[in-house]
Amino acid sequence: MQRILKAALHLLVWCFMAAWAHAQPLVSAQWLQAQAKGQVQLIDTRFGRAHAAARIPGAASLDVLGMSFRGLDPGAEIARVAKTAGLQAERPIVIYDEGADMNATSLYFEMLHQGYPMDRVHVLDGGFKFWKQIGGALEQGTPTLAAPSAASTFTSGPARPAVLAQLSDVLAAPSNGAVLVEALQPNYFHATLGYFDRKGHIPQAKLMPHGDFFVADGRFKSPAALREMYAHQGVKPSDPSISYCGGGVAASVPWFAAHALLGQSQAKLYKSSLMEYMRDDRQLPLWTYGDESLRRNAQFVSAWTSPNFSVRRQGQVKAIDVRSAADFARGHVAASLSMPADAWPRERSGTEWQAALRAQGVSARHELVILGPGGITPAAAWAWWLSVQAGQPRASIAWEGMDEFAIEGVELAKGAPKASPGASASASASAGAGAGASVGAAAPTTSTALPVQASVQWIATAVSADRIEAPAQALSLAYGPLLDRQQKPLSAPALWAALEKAGVSRLQPIAVTAKDPAEAAVLVYLLRLMGFATARVG
């Protein structure tokens, strides 16, 4: 009787595990190891020479990168392997690569796109690397697959075009609320390196290299950790996404994570990726900084604040001049509003700043462009940060000063600023809140003990290293060397190299602290310019 009960229990466990795997795109090495011999069909997506050297017993070979490099038709290659190996749609099919790699997810995407039945197709979590780590059986020597005992029943049906993004989808992504995800490394994203004749990334894309989706042993990060990754980029995991890379293979990793692990039904893969985008005859734009919408120039400000827009009540941009009233009077953009930086307290919420903006006729729909003496100064950065904190959907800084505006042909107005209704009352309220400190002269805001937030990377900054007052647990990074002689940010490749050398983390929330919060705002601006979307003044 005990023997019967034991057998029944084993059968029940096996049925449960089979049902669980049936519903899971990702299966563990332990699950695979527990399956009876011959129950699971395997496809090795590594290079052919790696497959020949060692493999999981019984695995068929489909060299995904070789297929891509040789321009072979994925549908034909899948059909060839299915026929050769006699793949049965009724039995589990497990795809694996080396681990922390892109080949298995790429083949999974191709099968889905080509219309194959996917309810029993799985990716091996951790791949070959983790299989070896747990002591999984290996087969070595020249691979020999026995002739299939039956014809393959694993055949394609109607294609699933919804998972494949076209160039038109990529160009329309920002207006459609879709997030673009680049799966290449930072050196490609920031134009230090390039696969093609031009360098950089598709505008508004988020940098999420395919290696970021794995833990050290090659397995995928947990869904909770993946959600944190997306949140760190300022993205909701539920947002529709389009993943791309150089040629469409690496992009399969963020696509698989979104589609299969986070359940994002609208996730797409732009298979043609930069190979198509950069060859387009229209010379489509590329960014090198992470978020170039934080940068505006003289022509942008002049065009979008012109009376032609304001008279017709179509103005969507407001220019805020944070220079002194005397400098403003000597020459300013005609439609700009004078809000001198030294009149504003170092309050963190942006509440007073928001009240003053509303008093000047600035609504929540306006993009604010901060005008300063030129470059990224503490005054300009602080006004920008207050605008962010005040909830303005867009806030940017013009990198040119008024002399450069004039050289660019922008006609400057002269004279003292005109008071707007309610502006004086708001300014008085701000002064009463402690607005007397000028930029660089604010009371110290750091202390020897920072708030305990284990997941946050704290960075202490000042214009130069010798002026930094850094608590023990904070990374020190002067912002001065990140700017050129005109106080403008260094090129994106140079900035990335400096941030990488300093040890700034791409995978942690960042809080910046300084004796004067306006100096912290300079580094926060530079970090957000480089794509660190959640960096903040601490």
Image (spheres, rainbow, N blue to C red):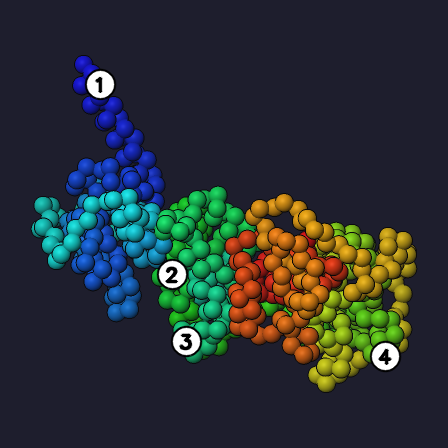
Q: Are marks 4 and 1 in contact (CB under 8 Å)?
A: no
State the SS at label 3. loop
In the displayed structure, would residue 498 be above or below residue 514?
below
State the SS at label 1. helix
Q: Are marks 2 and 1 in contact (CB under 8 Å)?
A: no
Find disc 4 in the rendering and name its residue. 330
Find disc 2 in the rendering and name its residue. 250
Find disc 3 in the rendering and name its residue. 196
Find disc 1 in the rendering and name its residue. 5
State the SS at label 2. loop
**Gap in angstroms between the C-alphas marked 4 and 1:** 93 Å
Comparing labels 4 and 1, the label whose residue is closer to the camera: 1
**Gap in angstroms between the C-alphas marked 2 and 3:** 16 Å
**Gap in angstroms between the C-alphas marked 1 and 3:** 64 Å
Q: Residues within 10 Å of mark 1 (few under 14, many from 20)?
A: few
**Gap in angstroms between the C-alphas marked 4 and 3:** 47 Å
**Gap in angstroms between the C-alphas marked 4 and 2:** 54 Å
Find residue 299 and name its label. none
Residue type (three-letter) at the residue carrying disc 4 = Arg
Q: Quadrant of residue 471?
A: bottom right
Mark 1 or mark 3, earlier in chain: 1
Mark 4 or mark 3, earlier in chain: 3
Q: Residues within 10 Å of mark 3 (few under 14, many from 20)?
A: few
Instruction: Identify the residue shown where x is 19% and y is 40%.
Output: 39
In the displayed structure, would residue 117 be above or below residue 110?
above
Residue type (three-letter) at the residue carrying disc 1 = Leu
Q: Residues within 10 Å of mark 2 (few under 14, many from 20)?
A: many
